[in-house]
Image (cartoon, grey):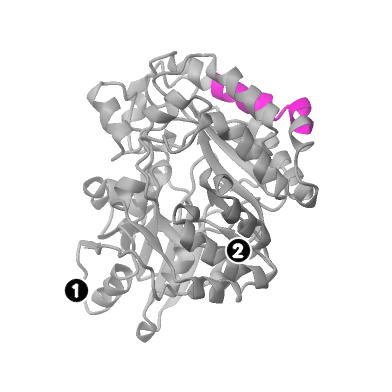
């Protein structure tokens, strides 16, 4: 059996490395983990293609093609799937978007895998081999992730990534943020891998570094402390994601630093507590954000701070207020986005009920394009404000002001990533231009032909 695993990319990221020859992206885990789940008895030959770092070559010989898709890449995935099915390939779709929109996705696939795939993907392949492929596979995930195989990183085009040492210790999130797909897509499950399993996988890595892709392993404080204690002897340097809980617990923060944490991505989302409360992110305290940033910096941990524009209680002053906060607190790597109503989220359902969705062209649901009618400003002004914020924060004066607060031990890392984001800010996508004038064009699901 021959298996091809594909990860289409959105237009913003397709085949682009930015200012550097090598991409600043880390290797995703989805395809390499799926490859590791292929039953040995099938004797399958597995190939991986990630369009984020290489153009897709669709002229291949394969029995089964697995394609993963998020909402922003769904239309690209559908076009590729349709082309491959027309050539006689058996196509399986999975990922967040097919999980949220299974009826839509089923029109473009021979079979769907929704939810997590530890049980269903191996069973699907066995069924295919026996001639009994079913149209849909789903199995619930428990609270503990035992026996997750070590990802087959050797299948990656390694030179295309900043690192292939990506790993997860937890999945899901216990929170219910209004705009987030995770609670809906993964049914509110917050699951853990046994600490010993995580340590065993870290010990297989080439080089003393890792990137944890977990949304927030610190939500279970006792688990996170146990993990970080176990990591200390490994003497690695790692990056990851967290909520502000990391900075609120002194022991947890100390252990994270001792275990080698050099940077975290935090979704601050807004500098307004009222906005956070409205988005169901009341567990963050905006009044303490500056203190959190200082504490993290004091422990040698840099911060990628993410902010979202377009919430209902925001007006045009939000852009300047947010950029000023970023400069004042010296957040190392700011990232800006517009609120995006992904299917299945409370935000999507509310905007749909209010008739405020501008279109359902999924290729523009990439958090950098406005796809709904805001309350406090026009769609055009929201798009312009997003662009202004990016370019203001990555102007040379702001660039150097912010980096003057970066921990010296990791200054080279933040310098390179800031240069990469400065390039992005200067080359923001222009695809949104004109979409507010001719929305009828965006209803099509055939955005572009597939190059072969």
**Res 259 quadrant in image:** bottom right
In this view, the mark in front (1 or 2): 2
Residue 322 placement, left or right of 94? right
Magenta segment, which residues? 385-400
Residue 320 visible (yes or no): yes
Q: What is the C-alpha distance between the residues marked 1 and 2?
A: 35 Å
Q: Is residue 393 magenta?
A: yes
Which residue lies at the image location 53% right of the left edge and 36% below the top edge? 268
**Residue 412: percent from the left, percent from the top?**
78, 49
Residue at 52% x, 53% y: name it: 51
Residue at which label 2 appears = 164
Mark found first going from the N terminus, 1 or 2: 1
On the rendered structure, is 329 left or right of 376?
A: right
Determine crowd level at label 2: few under 14, some 14-19, many 20+ residues with C-alpha closer than 10 A.
many
| Image position, residue 156 (x, y; %) | 57, 66
Dominant SS of magenta comes to helix
């Amino acid at each position: 059996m021959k298996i091809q695993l594909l990860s289409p990319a959105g237009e913003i990221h397709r085949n682009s490395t930015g200012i550097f020859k090598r991409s600043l992206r880390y290797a995703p885990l989805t395809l390499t983990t799926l490859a590791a789940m292929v039953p040995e008895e099938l004797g399958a030959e597995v190939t991986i293609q990630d369009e984020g770092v290489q153009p897709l070559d669709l002229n291949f010989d394969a029995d089964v093609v697995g394609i993963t898709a998020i909402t922003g890449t769904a239309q690209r995935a559908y076009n590729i799937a349709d082309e491959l099915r027309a050539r006689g390939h058996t196509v399986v779709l999975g990922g967040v978007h097919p999980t949220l929109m299974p009826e839509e996705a089923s029109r473009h696939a021979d079979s769907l895998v929704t939810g997590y795939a530890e049980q269903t993907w191996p069973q699907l392949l066995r069924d295919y081999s026996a001639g009994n492929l079913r149209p849909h596979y789903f199995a619930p995930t428990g609270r503990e992730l035992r026996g997750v195989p070590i990802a087959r990183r050797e299948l990656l085009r390694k030179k295309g990534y900043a690192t292939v040492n990506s790993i997860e210790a937890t999945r899901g999130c216990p929170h219910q943020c209004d705009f987030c797909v995770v609670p809906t897509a993964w049914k509110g499950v917050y699951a853990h891998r046994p600490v010993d399993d995580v340590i065993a996988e870290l010990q297989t890595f080439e080089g003393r570094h890792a990137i944890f892709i977990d949304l927030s392993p610190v939500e279970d404080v006792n688990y996170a402390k146990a993990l970080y204690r176990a990591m200390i002897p490994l003497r690695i340097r790692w990056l990851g994601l967290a909520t502000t809980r990391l900075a609120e617990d002194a022991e947890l923060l100390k252990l994270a630093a001792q275990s080698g944490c050099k940077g975290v991505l935090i979704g601050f989302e807004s500098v307004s507590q009222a906005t956070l409360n409205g988005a169901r992110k009341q567990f963050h305290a905006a009044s303490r954000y500056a203190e959190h940033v200082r504490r993290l910096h004091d422990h040698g941990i840099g911060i990628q701070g993410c902010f979202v524009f377009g919430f209902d209680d925001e007006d045009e002053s939000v852009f300047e207020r947010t950029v000023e906060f970023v400069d004042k607190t010296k957040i190392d790597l700011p990232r800006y986005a517009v609120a995006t109503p992904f299917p299945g989220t409370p935000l999507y359902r509310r905007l749909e009920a209010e008739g405020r969705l501008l279109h359902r062209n999924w290729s523009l649901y990439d958090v950098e394009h406005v796809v709904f009618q805001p309350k406090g400003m026009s769609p055009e002004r929201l798009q312009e404000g997003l662009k202004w914020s990016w370019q203001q924060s990555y102007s040379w004066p702001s660039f150097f002001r912010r980096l003057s607060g970066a921990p010296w031990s990791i200054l080279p890392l933040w310098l390179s990533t800031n240069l990469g984001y400065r390039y992005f800010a200067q080359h923001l996508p222009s695809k949104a231009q004109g979409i507010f004038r001719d929305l009828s064009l965006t209803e099509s699901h055939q955005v572009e032909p597939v190059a072969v």
